[in-house]
Image (cartoon, rainbow, N blue to C red):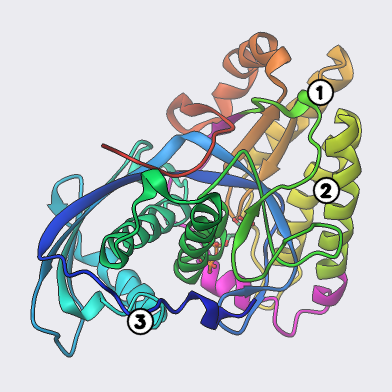
Amino acid sequence: MSADNFIPKPYSHSIENGSVSVQAPSNIALVKYWGKYGEQLPQNASVSFTLSECRTETTLHFEKISRSENFNFEVYLDGKREESFEPKIQKFFERVEKYVPFLKEYKFKIETKNTFPHSSGIASSASGMSALAVCLVQLENQLLGVNLSTALDETRESQLNKASFLARLGSGSASRSIEGPLVVWGVHPEIEGSSNLFGVKYPDAVHENFSNYQDTILLVDKGEKQVSSTVGHDLMHDHPYSAERFKEANNNLAKLKTIFKEGDLSAFIEIVESEALQLHAMMMASKPYFILMKPNTLEIINNIWDFRRETGSEVCFTLDAGANVHVLYPVSEKERVQKFIVEQLAVFCKNGEYIHDQCGLGARLIS
Ligand code: DP6
């Protein structure tokens, strides 16, 4: 399949105005996407748990205008105009216009809010871009006269693919927030249907040990990101270890395939923690170099390792491109691990703050 497959056929319906509301979650990568080429294409396949509580809710209001030269939109966060978000949306619209060619025929008001605090250091680009992408696909459905309640499974699947395809053009990891609980983005020889163009629901067997997996996000540093994703991904060009890293990520995904099937949590932990540390190792070894962990990030990691050694727990950690720690654990250990978090890890969080989350099923319409 090529990107051109996402160019729609001519629209058969005309819609004057209306609105569509969508909620979409964040996700946490187990095998990390770090390095891209071309138009938002990943250098390796990645896989993530889709989250459930950390999400963005977006309403796209649209009003037909005569076709204009420029995009016509305003972004509101929590009811207040947020002009600082607009350049990112402008860029997103420029990238996706070819695939949703109605954009310049409407005036849009994009109202958005997050369930997690704006200053939490949790990236809202994955949830935000996937929510907006689903809004656009919904509007396009109306223009195509697609009735979702009677649509064939095939139509639904192609809509999910298109939403993920559009979301990817906004932010790579957003392509993994449309569905859940496990999503692969990036072509991989052992994952059927995998693609660089969009994320797909993990298609193979998953052991019940991974059902309802828990993720508590420990907010270690709530400030602005020290390195933006764009800069970070760029650092993988001309990086001394990039070729090996991309290979290693694909190998790790192949190993996870067996682990998901057999439910081997010890093997899972080894891959997931190694992936987190490799992501940070790449940043430490790039030019310029960065250390995105904070002293409390390391305190938390060491405490998790001690707890695991002392109790035999299968709790583990992963990191995104910052200092916050995602604590991952099976639902069967929920009580004991959450007690450990409250008693021993919360002290390392800014203002003692953390967010309990768990795997979820992806984006959906809000009626
Ligand atoms: C470390 O998806 O934020 O979270 O495509 O430039 O928007 P852009 O990057 P982004 O990168 C996320 C990187 C990561 C790992 C991951 O989610 O796989």
Label 1, residues with CA under 10 Å away: few <14, some 14-19, many ≥20: some
Q: Helix, strand or loop at disc 1?
A: loop
State whether residue 42 is above or below residue 123. below
Residue 288 placement (x, y as % from top left) = 65, 76
Residue 355 place in picture, x, y as percent: 49, 28
Q: Which residues are magenta?
A: 215-244
Label 3 element class = helix
* Separation of marks 3 and 2 at Cα, in angstroms: 37 Å
Q: Residue 307: x and y, percent?
A: 79, 19
Q: In the rendered image, which quarter is residue 62 located in?
A: bottom left
Is 58 on the left or on the right of 174, as rendered?
left
Q: Pick whichever of labels 1 and 3 is earlier in the sequence.
A: 3
Q: Residue at x 14, y 55 (%)?
A: 18
- Which of labels 3 and 2 is toward the front? 3
Q: Is residue 219 in view from this perspective?
A: no
- Picture layout, residue 67 above or below residue 228: below
**Residue 254 relative to residue 167: left or right:** right
Residue named by callout 2: 274
Dot 3 surroundings within 10 Å: few (below 14), some, or many (20 or more)?
Answer: some
What residue lies at 57% left-to-right and 15% top-to-bottom? 342
Q: Quadrant of ligand 1?
A: bottom right
Q: Secondary structure at mark 2?
A: helix
Q: Quadrant of the C terminus?
A: top left
The residue tagged 1 is 314
Residue flagged by tag 1: what amino acid is it?
Glu
Asked if the stretch drawn in magenta spans residue 216, the answer is yes
Callout 1 touching callout 3 (CB < 8 Å)? no
Which mark sits nearer the N-terminus, 3 or 2? Answer: 3
- Mark drawn on residue 94: 3
Amino acid under label 2?
A: Ser
